[in-house]
Image: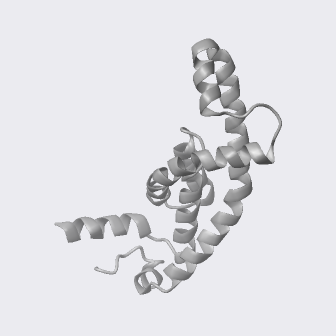
Amino acid sequence: MRGRIGGLLKRIFVQGTSPHELALTLALGIVVGCLPLVWGSTLICALLALRLGLNQPGIQAANYLAYPLQIALFVPFYRMGATIFPWGPSVSAQLLAQGLKRDVGGNVALLAVSIVKAVAAWLLVAPPVALLLYVVLRVAFSRTPALNRDAGTGLAASE
């Protein structure tokens, strides 16, 4: 049963894809999955896959698998954004805790500014990381015989 499910998943994710397309799909899914927002990465991945003709299940799987990394990178992106763009206040746990008791509207603005800074930091980091990830994955997938042999036919290696 495990082999059948594994074979089915492999066919879904690599069906008709070349090493180039698979590497691009996974690199974009992972990088967009690290976007420091709690919403939107699924939609962005769907739009990228449609626009670039990439494998929709593959990009969404990479996006979802990147969620732990996204959570781990929230604070570093916020700090990087605050360092690069020093204008305006920065979020700190103490400021946020004090502000929640007094001014919820002010906190929304504070969080919005911090999110903009974090996304700006992500925009600076994402392109070189995506390129590096793409190159590494492309080399790895180019050396995988099943992907090279079956890229045009969409057949899995087990068939």
Instruction: Identify the residue at horizontal 69%, vertical 36% (top origin).
Output: 114
How many marks can you see?
0
Image quadrant in which you'd find residue 159:
bottom left
- Residue at the far left: name it: 1
Q: Residue 111 in the image: x percent, y percent?
A: 66, 30
The image quarter containing residue 37 is: top right
Please give left or right for residue 16 compared with residue 78 in the image.
Answer: left
Give the residue at x 22% y 71%.
Answer: 3
Residue occupying image coordinates x 52% and y 76%: 19
* Picture colour scheme: one colour
Of 96 and 150, the residue lying toward us: 96
Q: How far across and how far down the image is residue 71, in percent?
A: 51, 47
> Residue at point 58% right, 45% down?
74
Instruction: Point out the residue furthest to the right here.
Output: 87
**Nearer to the camera, 122 or 134:** 122
Q: Is residue 52 left or right of residue 1?
A: right
Give the quadrant of residue 128. bottom right
Above or below, comparing residue 123 to residue 91 in the picture:
below
Q: Nearer the viewer, residue 22 or 30?
A: 30
Quadrant the N terminus occupies: bottom left
In the rendered image, residue 16, in percent from the top left (x then y), is placed at 46, 71
Seen as rendered, the residue at the extreme top is 102
Give the vertical position of 144 relative to 74 (above or below): below
Front-most of residues 74 and 136: 74
